[in-house]
Image (cartoon, rainbow, N blue to C red):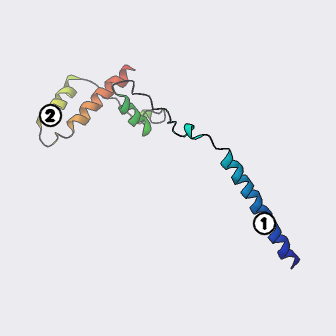
Amino acid sequence: MPDLEVAQAAILDQYEDECQIIKQKAANKPPSSHWNILPPLPPAPNGAHHFCRLFLNHFGYLSFDNKSSFHMIENTQRFQRSVVQLDKTSGYSHLSPILSLSLSLSLSIRSL
């Protein structure tokens, strides 16, 4: 029985300590005028292809590890005719914005 009383006393002491800590934390909270402070907004995009670079970076295509697996598209007359031909082809009309975006992205990355 003495072990039971020692355990109960230890639990009561721990409970009282926790109650004191909770009271101290409640008394130490900042005034309500500080509660409505919002975090700063993220910066605005810097360039025309900012989100494209962000997407490629997020998926790891702009890291040095994957540099060998990422091939640039050459901006040749043949490639430009192919993009124009995709605009005329009904089956691939949904791919045209993606290819033109990749063309402009490859040109912008190459200019970096």
Toward which corner of the image does residue 16 lie, by quadrant? bottom right
Lateral position of residue 28 relative to residue 91, left or right: right
Lateral position of residue 81 relative to residue 25, left or right: left
Whole-percent x and y of residue 78? Answer: 19, 26
Whole-percent x and y of residue 59? Answer: 42, 40
Toward which corner of the image does residue 18 lie, by quadrant? bottom right
Vertical placement of residue 6 versus 16, above or below: below
**Sequence-first tag of 1 and 2:** 1
Q: Which mark is residue 87?
A: 2
Vertical placement of residue 18 versus 103, above or below: below
Amino acid at the residue labelled 2: Asp
Lateral position of residue 6 relative to residue 27, left or right: right
Amino acid at the residue labelled 1: Leu
Residue that label 1 marks: 12
Kindly report which numbered mark, 1 or 2, lies closer to the viewer in this rendering: 1
Question: At 85% from the left edge and 71% from the top edge, which residue is drawn?
Answer: 6
Toward which corner of the image does residue 74 lie, by quadrant? top left
User: Which secondary structure, mark 2?
Assistant: helix
At label 1, counting other C-alpha atoms closer than 10 Å, the crowd grade (few under 14, some 14-19, many 20 or more) is: few
> Looking at this view, is 31 or 101 the one in front?
31
Q: Which mark is residue 2?
A: none
